[in-house]
Amino acid sequence: PQSFHLVILGGDGIGPEVCDQSVRLLEIMQPHLDGVEFQLDRHSVGVGEYQRSGEALPQSAYDACLASDAVLLGAMGLPNVRYPNGKEIAPQLDLRERLQLYGGVRPIRLYHEADTPLKGHGPGEIDFVLVRESTEGLFYGRDAIADLEADEATNLLRITRSASERVCRLAFETARRRDGKKTVTLIDKANVLSSMVYFRHVFDEVAKEFLDIKAEHVYVDAAALFLVRRPQDFDVMVTENMFGDILSDLAAGLVGGMGMAPSGDIGDDAAVFQPSHGSAPDIAGQSIANPIAMHLSTAMMLEWLDHPETRRAADALNAAIADVLSDPTQRTADMGGNLSTVEITDKIAERL
Amino acid sequence: PQSFHLVILGGDGIGPEVCDQSVRLLEIMQPHLDGVEFQLDRHSVGVGEYQRSGEALPQSAYDACLASDAVLLGAMGLPNVRYPNGKEIAPQLDLRERLQLYGGVRPIRLYHEADTPLKGHGPGEIDFVLVRESTEGLFYGRDAIADLEADEATNLLRITRSASERVCRLAFETARRRDGKKTVTLIDKANVLSSMVYFRHVFDEVAKEFLDIKAEHVYVDAAALFLVRRPQDFDVMVTENMFGDILSDLAAGLVGGMGMAPSGDIGDDAAVFQPSHGSAPDIAGQSIANPIAMHLSTAMMLEWLDHPETRRAADALNAAIADVLSDPTQRTADMGGNLSTVEITDKIAERL
Ligand SMILES: CC(C)[C@H](C(=O)O)[C@@H](O)C(=O)O
Ligand SMILES: CC(C)[C@H](C(=O)O)[C@@H](O)C(=O)O
């Protein structure tokens, strides 16, 4: 059988409890997959691990990620715990940078009209993927430390050809694979920023490699407006790190919030799948966290493993989730429901 | 009588036609204002003027703005017309920078539930002001020219103490004057960017001058999500230039689009009031443009002139607009209605 080495990183706050539920679903599915074996390799990472060992991302965990077929991550970070220099501990950013996970793939899909704050959108009528460049852009400057006594502070937004090419290619490939409008929309600010003129230039070059896919440009301010007024028009969007950070949260807000938004951080040597939400320590340990984003991320991982059986499993998991969510009373507390983390997972498991 | 020197800049595209309608309203109100006289001083600016004279913002127009009590501007810019070096012509950015119009004040108010794409919000239930720093931030780098053959392109995000202090003070003063939650929310990304740690530090210092106003912080990604899920929670937001550009368009989208979003660009030596929308050359000359944002900007100007009679006029104009908009069939084409630019202005004029 083909064995997949999956690294499981529960992390902080609600991370471990939602991650455990996804592992439970993996274990339920595994016996039904022909010739496929999951080898689960758990590691402790995050701010809790930093407090224990002094390292949020121990070398052994990092090495395991690099050697793995895929990584499943709960959530990392805890407000109020900082490095001695005052910086927040954000090991997910370290992971993205060190593993060069350049493509932050964030699918946005509406499962029931009750879940969206927008009028007039039914199931599947919001359905697009935002691809966020995740190794540079304005986040390039994140290692700087502010001098609070100085007269000014700066950060550099950096766009390189190589990083732009690879993330644009990923966006076009995503559009090609999806059953959508076969369109990639570059979100930029080329009317004002030279780095964005450059980004647009590289995007247009890459677009020539994908003549079957329509390429278009929208300014980031207009994109924010379009997302609330006609989100149904988008298929695949690709954008700079900071813009992607903002727009992906906005987009998650359109389909039920961060608890509904899965993500895959994709690189050439590794891939990390995790919900877009944070560690929410205020609700940790109560089994009230919404595990849907985690389960959807797990389905993304199964599809990404790209074996016929894991793809079948991904389809089955997505279908089971969609079926549960088709009844708007089947929700966790963040969405006004009363199912626990385990209960809503049980309902998914029943359908697998 | 007190004479106010008002510079009128129609600009490009639909700019002149919406601006003319606001001037008409000013002329209707003027005879009813006791001891107040408007001296209207028209100048040609924008891309059309650039094509005629080689200068988008002629020195005489600039001098008039600087000497004026306030500037009323329609819209400037035309896609496809560029400087020889390929840069877009954005004279509104030049105005902001040269006149040091540091505070981009963008009020967002819902007049009728039919105007919002969000469920469950009635008139006045979305009502906040976004204050966008408008002289630096990521726009600081806008003079750079991209070298498309290079391996990378960069822009600098710059936050100075002096610009941050003045824009934060403006935000707190706005919250103090408003009949709202008496809260200023700083929108930053202090968990990642040192410039934002710095911005937050200056904001916190300024907050100590306004102990009657609550000060809070929200990360920009979370703010984008909150704007779609609970916009009613905001009173006054203050943020960096690029973040403000994105969030203000998003916010305009919540109350009917750019045609509903007024703005004031406020400096210590000048102030420019203009709709947030652009010049929309595709619909220019047809009298179908929505003049509401222009009229609301005019009301902002009247209030800003800060004379008892102009404040009274501002209240009257705002009330007349609100009364017209209380009937959701009274709309221009952009909002699904069939009133012309002139007709909807007539309805406002009738109520003055
Ligand atoms: C937690 C934070 C550092 C992170 C980011 O800004 O990238 C998060 O918002 C995200 O979107 O993954
Ligand atoms: C037209 C453009 C340069 C401008 C900006 O980016 O500031 C506009 O979007 C705005 O919000 O006033």
Image (spheres, coloured by chain):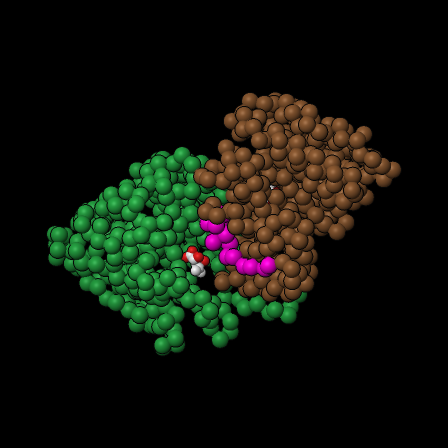
Chain colours: A green, B brown
User: Residue B216: within the magenta?
Assistant: yes
Q: In the orientation shown, which residue stands out farthest toward the right?
A: B1
Q: Is residue A265 visible?
A: yes
- Return the residue nearer the eye: B110 or A21: B110
User: Residue B307: within the magenta?
Assistant: no
Classify residue A323 as left or right of residue A336: left
Rendered position, A168 above or below A294:
above
**Whereabouts is ligand 1, in terms of quadrant?**
bottom left
Q: Residue at the location (48% across, 48% down)?
A: B230
The quadrant holding residue B209 is bottom right
Rendered position, B312 above or below A103:
above
Report the label total: 0
Q: Residue at the location (35% across, 36% down)?
A: A122
- Return the residue nearer the eye: B272 or A324: A324
Q: Residue at the location (28% across, 69% down)?
A: A43
Classify residue B311 as left or right of residue B104: right
Classify residue B122 as left or right of residue A175: right
What residue range appears in magenta? B214-227
Rendered position, B34 above or below A206:
above
Give x and y (percent) for residue A258: 39, 52
- Return the residue nearer the eye: A100 or B269: B269
Q: Residue at the location (33% across, 72% down)?
A: A59
Give x and y (percent) for residue B190: 52, 62
Q: Is residue A247 visible?
A: no
Q: In the orientation shown, which residue stands out farthest toward the bottom?
A: A53
- Return the residue nearer the eye: A288 or B240: A288
**Quadrant showing the N terminus of chain B:** top right
Give x and y (percent) for residue B48: 68, 31
The quadrant holding residue A216 is top left
